Every structure is written in C-alpha cells, then in structure tokens.
Amino acid sequence: MADSSDKTTAINPQLTDWTGPLGLPRFDLIRDADFAPAFDATLAEAERAVEMIAANPEPASFDNTIAALELAEEPLNKVAAVFYTLASADANPDRQALERDLAPRMAAHNTRIVMDPRLFARIQAVSDAPDALNPEQARVTELYLRDFRRAGAALTGPKRDRMAAIRERLAVLSNQFSQNVLADERDYVLPLTEADLDGLPQSLRDMMAAAARERGIKGYALTLGRSLIVPFLEYSARRDLREIAWRAWTGRGDGTGAGGDATDNRRIAAEILQLRHERAQLLGYADFAAFKLEPEMAGSADRVRDLLMQVWGPARARAEADAARLTEMLHADGVNGVLEPWDWRFYARQRRGAEHAIDPEEVKPYLTLDAMLGAVFDVAGRLYGLSFVPVAAPLWRPEVRAWDVLRGDRHMATFVGDYFARPSKRSGAWCSSLQVQRLMAPDQRAIVTNICNFTPPSQPGAPAFLSWDDARTLFHEFGHATHHILSNVTYPSISGTSVARDFVELPSQLYEHWLSVPEILAKHARHAQTGEPMPDALRERLLAAANADAGFSTVEYLASALVDLDFHDGPPPADPMARQAEVLAELDLPHAIPMRHATPHFAHVFSGDGYSSGYYSYMWSELMDADAFAAFEEAGDPFDPPTARRLEETILSQGGSEPADQLWTRFRGRMPGVEPLLKGRGLTAG
C-alpha cells in the first residue's frame, strides 16, 4: 500500500468523481493501470477516516459513530464498484492479477475495521442508548452491532489473531475458486464440422459459427456458455457429442477442464469448508450452518432441511415418472441401456414438442431481447409508474446500455444492462449496483446493473433472440433491480437488496410471474420479422408447458441445496467430493439428473460465502413469491394498484430497515405455507 503521507500518487479522478451522464463513471477515460494507485490511495484514506471515528474523544453518538462509518469509505467504495464490475463482466489478465492481489488486502482492511475494539465499544454505547434513536437508526445500529460481533470484534488474544487470518485466507481462496471456474469456461472449445451438426436448428448453427469465428476456428465451435451448451444438449442427435459436451460442462473446476490441475477447485473447496467451520467455532457456534443461518428468516438448518425435504418427495416422484417416459423414447430410438444425464434434455425437448406442440425455435422469433426489455419496462410502468429513457453513456463495452429511470419527472435511478455472453464474463446472471440509494446527505439514487449471458446476435444489426428461460432470467434480474430502484431509506447499509439472504430473492422471483401474464405476452411477444403478435394458440401451449420438466429442474436444484446444507451443518467433510456422492446416494438422486452445481464449480457457495449454507434461499423466497403474486390474483388484476402500492411501501422501498419477516407480514398478514410453492411448480394434483 502506498504511504499515507505520499501526496504525489496520481489518481484518475474518474474513479472517485464520476462525471458521465446521470453520474455514471466515464469508463472510456479509465485504464487498467489506474486501479492500483487508486486502491492504494483510497484504502489509506479510508483507514484514516475510520481511525478518526475510533479515536474520537467525544462520547459515542449515532452521528459521530454509525453515520460517520456509513460514509467513511465512500471514495474506496467508488473505486471498488468500478473495478469489480469490470472484473466480473469483462475480465482480462491484468484485472485478474489485481483482483488476486486485492483479495487479502481488502479482507485485511475490512477485518481491521470490524474487529477494532474501540469501534465495537462505541457501537455498543450507541446501542445502549436506544431512546436517542429513531426506528431506522436503531435498526442500523442493531445491524452494526450484530455484524461486528459476528466478525469477531469481541475476540481477544490468539483467537482474535486466528480469526483475522481466516478471513484473509478465505478471501484469497474464494477469488481463486471463481477465477478457476472462469478459466475453464473461457478456455474450453470443441471444434465441430458440418457433419457434427445433425439435429441442430439453423439458429444454433449460426451461433456456433460465430463462436468459431471469434476464436479463429474454421467451421463451428461449441463453448461452455450456457446459451450454447444447453441448446446443444437439447438438439444434438449425436449422443457421443452430447456426452463429451455434458462432461466438459459438468467438469468445470474438477481438474478435468481446460486448465487441468491449475484450475482444480476440489482442494480449495475442502479448505474453505474447514476454515468456515473453524471461524464459526471461534465465535461459539456449533458449526457454520448455525452461524450463517442465525440472522436469516429460516433461522436454523433443521427448518431449512424440513422445507427442502417437503418438496423433495413430490419432485423426485415426478422426476422418476418423467425418467421412465424418456427411457421409453431412448429405447424407441434403438439405444439400449439406461437414460444418461446427456440424454435428458434431448428427449425432454422432444417430449414437450409431442405433448404440448412446443418447439423452442418456433417461440424464439417472438422473444427478442428488445421486445422482452419492452415487456420488463412495461410491467414496471404499470406496477410502479416507472418509465425508462435510453441514455448514451460511455460504458465498459459498446453493447452495454443505460437508461434513466423516471417516475413522472423525478429521477429514480440509473439502470445499466449488459446482456450478451463473452469469454471475459463470468457465467450466470446477476444484479449489482455501482451506487446504492440513500437519503442521508449527500443523498443519491441507485445506479443498478443487470448482467446476463444471452446469445449475442448472429451478425451486427440482427435481433438477439431469447429462449423462454432467458426471458425468465431477464425478468428475474430486473426484479432485483426494482429493489434498488424503489429503495427509499436513509442509510446506505440497509439500502436496496441489503436484506436477509433468504428474503433477497423474493422481489426477483416474484417479478418472473409477470412474464406469463397473457396481456404482457400479447403486447410484447411479436415476431422479429413480421411484427405479428404471438398467436394465442402458441402462447397457450407455451404457458401450458411451463412446468413440463418441473421434476428435473426441482430435483437438480434441491440436490445442490441439500449438498450445500450438509457441507456446513456439522463438521466439514475432509473430502467434499466423497461427501457429495454420499449425500446424493442418501437422497437416491435419479441417475440421469445431476445436481445443478457440482462442488468444483458451485460458485454460489465457494466464490465468497453469500450463498454458503444458503443456496436454499431461492426456494425459501419461492414460498413467499407464489403467495405474493396470489395477492394480485385475489385482487382480480395482476396490476392491481393498491396491491402494487402496498408491495412497494412494505417491501421494495424498505431495504433492510426492518427484519424480513416483519416486512413480509406487513404486506401479506401471515407467513406462507409450502402448498402454493408445490402448486406453482406443478407438483401437486391440484
């Protein structure tokens, strides 16, 4: 780190003083070489600011302690927001090298803050005088006190030193895990010729030809981007190639990928689990699950397991029945033996076509990215009165887009969308923020990003086509964005999605429901060439087929969630891969359905601990999202204004200003049961 007295280090002002349209950073004026000196300077500045708070001789108050901490790291946070957006959405070797260097430094910096006994004492003093606080201040103080305790601020001596070392080591390991997965995804390519394309639709052939051109390969190329690998497994009539593709996709991070031993995550996962367990025990918890779940809505591993197993039985039964039908189709094709994992998607697609007259290629022309963005924005307008005005802004790639989010004439937020897959982007889809909303001075509105991995257009100027799953992902991530856009709290630490992990997926999963509202599809699902709306009959068949493969999707998800829970509930396994196999055997997982995320590429759990012992949270939130949409159905209108207003006022605007269960019950009046979830997934007879 640069000496804090060094005044000569040049910092690119665009990293801390954003001057682009709507207050965006000017990405065109930022170079990779700018980041290291900016981190040096702003880390030093943040440490000076925090030291002033800790050493303040005045008695602790909310303003001179909690509110001061809220803004103490603002320049550092701005530099980090720009850098980590680029590192995840558009990685390169320089950014990855700096990310590896920063991981222990940032962890050490954060550890020094949350384990500072002087700060802990000041926060405790503020908490001990609750009458001086308004409800929002009391909540923020409560969360600071909880977070410092859970970070180890009350530890002393060797335990304190060991906790600091664990936190730094976990940061290094999590970063390496993530970079290894990205390397295996980025570097794998399977060259193919025309003779290898039997069964593939023309649109997929075009995408694979584009992938080959991008990599300087003749013919066609299959990569591990989900937008290529999944349709290949659905359409390829070459069973041998499906197996090769499936093994490459599911082998990311296990030492068999493109990086070999250099990107093997198995030992990393084992060490992460051991360190998490030690961390929990240093804080007095029996295991990491007890530590991690304490502040969540679920509260305990037993409650999580109870929910997951209530769904497991019906889902597995459905999956086994589906497997029997797909096996019949396999045998009818003259293939003897059992249904394999690389067979499931191929025959499930054929079955959907036969039973529901649905061909994904027939649907895609109606689901262009621009049309579905129009649908996403239309729903936000009808529910919350929002409008979206495109803004020309210099962002990190030419295809990245920005919008000014308005309510009437009032600026509500800035929304940025980066939608297309590329080798430099980590897989999956996510919502994050360059800037969070706050009312404390200087007040600010959110700058929120949605980043996805959709297939880019086959050629410049052509439309980008989405699958039904892609369209649902678009709605899902924008549901997260509404949590930021509509946030209306004073303090940044409780803004937007700063809520319990098993509550954060409620707005996103709830928003998915509006994709299936017939009037939204009728208005926005229009043919890319003719402009004609999707025929009523096709729309009805599409919606009828929504749960056609619910057994598969539910089982693969639950398998991952239950393995994650088992890893953290009790002593950690010495060999996570062996324990993963044992858990799946105990569940009697159907042979042809793998867990959605095998341990070596389970980024939700091992690239940071956001979803560690918490992958269940998608299903916990689904308990609520099914019941929340039912509130609109009970009102007789999916856009019922009073219900939408109540949703915004009780949940979307509130961030983490109250415990999640209180926010939910203010909206719905009661906690939900599991039946709406089972019904929504088509796993009941009702």
Image (cartoon, rainbow, N blue to C red):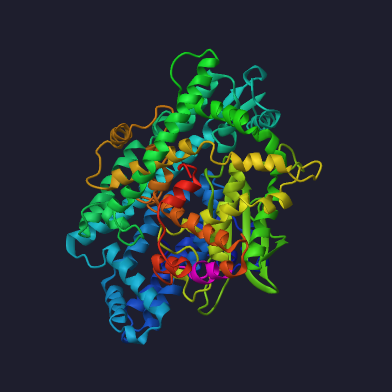
Q: Is residue 9 above or below residue 352?
A: below
Residue at 37% from the left image edge and 32% from the top image edge:
589
Q: Is residue 638 magenta?
A: no
Q: Is residue 347 above or below residue 163?
A: above
Residue at 33% from the left image edge and 77% from the top image edge:
54
Task: Give the residue furthest to the left.
Answer: 157
Task: Give the residue furthest to the right.
Answer: 530
Residue 307 position in % (x across, y down) = 35, 49
User: Residue 527: which quarter of the image?
Assistant: top right
- For this rendering, which residue is in front, 428 or 24? 428
Residue at 21% from the left image edge and 65% from the top image edge:
155
User: Residue 286: which quarter of the image?
Assistant: bottom left
* Label total for image: 0
- For this rendering, which residue is in front, 88 or 654? 654
The magenta segment: 645-655
Residue 35 position in % (x across, y down) = 52, 57
Specify the quadrant that holds the N terminus: bottom left
Residue 44 position in % (x across, y down) = 42, 67
User: Is residue 68 something that shows in the picture?
Assistant: yes
User: Is residue 457 something that shows in the picture?
Assistant: no
Task: Give the residue furthest to the front.
Answer: 686
